[in-house]
Image (tube, rainbow, N blue to C red):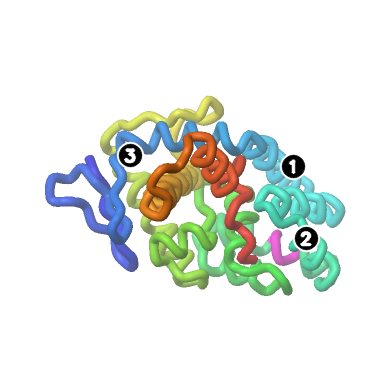
Amino acid sequence: MVAVLKYPELRLSSEGRTFEFVSLSIELEDFGSFLQLGLINDPETLAIEQCAQRLIQSDFNPQQTNEFICTVCGWGGYAGIAGRVIKNNDPLRIVSALRDAYAATQYGKIDVAMEHMLALKDLGVSFSSKHLKFLDPNRHVVLDSVISGRLGYPLTTDGYCRFVEVCQKILGHLSYRNIQTTSLNHQSWRLADVEMAIYQWLRKKTHEQSKQRRTAKLPTPTPEAGRSFAEGLLGPGRRDFRADG
């Protein structure tokens, strides 16, 4: 089954086997392999999710809240954002923003959760979504410059909510088609897992298209040069390209 996702609406292909993002398409059966790749590339994911659970259990202890922000921003590749957020916001305001965002999430108010995060200075949609994804992987995803740029979802609260809706629809199709998750830590697909698979798929597409462009410019590239370029472009984990706040 191919899923067709085109901003601002989700479309299934006529044969019901493909989702398409703008001019791209992904087989539902491939989500598992891309999720597995994401878990390999992001070995810190489980530990940060556990950190988030401890934070929630502490009712957002101020020190743990700051540590969580530093950890998430470091995972996103830009630890300096955490320093600015902590420096430019009142400590109690930071705690209340994360606590209120989590509470809104539990009532299904995804847009309200994002707005609580965006109330913090120096924390844009991209890094707000990163925090939300770890606070509740069942209800939140990451919307960064990679996904926004390639799939057309703007870095706004509305764009975020639309992307969440799309991931929810894909999640439903994965369940309907009985496509098993490849996560060793969870028995079923979560919303954040769907987004992780999409992100890895986009990395692959970016690599392939960049390679094609380089091949057109350089008729006789060496294998070593190609590997060096790909490693520099993609890097490890989810740290690449995520500087957009």
Real-space CA distance between mark 2 and mark 3, rounded to the nearest whole angstrom: 37 Å
Dot 3: what SS? helix
Dot 2: what SS? helix
- Residue at numbered disc 2: 80
Amino acid at circle 3 = Leu
Camera-nearest residue between 42 and 232: 232
- Residue at numbered disc 1: 54
Amino acid at circle 2 = Gly
Q: Quadrant of the C terminus?
A: bottom right
Amino acid at circle 1 = Arg
Task: Give the magenta range.
Answer: 95-99
Dot 1: what SS? helix
- Mark 2, Cα crowd under 10 Å, few <14 / some 14-19 / many 20+, is few
Q: Give coordinates of residue 175: x percent, y percent.
A: 33, 37
Main secondary structure found in the magenta portion:
helix
- Mark 3, Cα crowd under 10 Å, few <14 / some 14-19 / many 20+, is many
Q: Would residue 231 be found to the left or right of residue 154 on screen? A: right
